[in-house]
Image: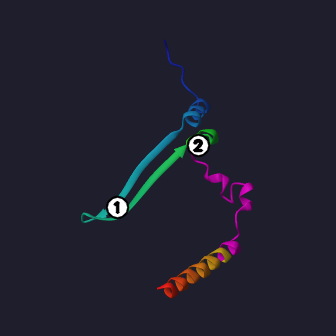
């Protein structure tokens, strides 16, 4: 039986359906001293497959999802940080008084 050559569309369909993971490390050394390590991880798959394996970062990313607009703005983050700092200061003051 002779194998039929697969087209690019067939190959992409299989990759998106099953998924493809490419992993590698790049290390830069000088005189046996490691100066830099870059770890590369690439996952190629369909959105359905990605969600099935627990990857769904695009749902909360402001650049990719219209639903993400519900996330706090930078000003709200700053207000929350200030409020947390106030509460930590109050706790610290109470602990000092309690001793």
Please tell me whether residue 75 belongs to the stretch shown in magenta: yes
Please tell me which residue is depicted at 66% across the width and 56% down the height of the picture: 60
Relative horizontal placement of residue 21, taking residue 78 as reference (left or right): left
Figure coloring: rainbow
Where in the figure is residue 7, as x and y percent of width and height? 58, 29
As drawn, the label of residue 9 is none
Q: Position of residue 86 (x, y in %)?
A: 61, 82
Q: What crowding class fits label 1: few (fewer than 14 Cα within 10 Å), some (14-19), or many (20 or more)?
A: few
Using the image as rendered, state which of residue 75 and residue 49 is in the foreground. 75
- Position in image of residue 36 (x %, y %): 37, 64
Residue indicated by mark 1: 28
- Decide if residue 62 is on the left or right side of residue 6: right
Residue 31 is covered by the magenta coloring: no
In which quarter of the view is residue 18 placed? Answer: top right
Magenta span of residues: 54-78
Residue beneath the point at 60% across and 33% down: 13
Cα distance between the residues tagged 1 and 2 = 32 Å
In the picture, residue 46 is in which quadrant? top right
Tag 2 residue: 50
């Amino acid at each position: 039986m002779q194998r039929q050559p697969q087209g690019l569309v067939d190959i992409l369909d299989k990759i998106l359906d099953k998924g493809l993971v490419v992993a590698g490390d790049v290390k830069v050394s000088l005189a046996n001293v490691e100066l830099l390590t870059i770890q590369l991880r690439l996952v190629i798959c369909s959105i359905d497959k990605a969600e099935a394996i627990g990857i769904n970062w695009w749902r909360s990313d402001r650049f990719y999802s219209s639903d993400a607009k519900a996330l706090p703005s930078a000003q709200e983050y700053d207000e929350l940080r200030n409020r947390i700092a106030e509460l930590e200061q109050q706790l610290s003051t109470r602990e000092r008084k309690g001793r």
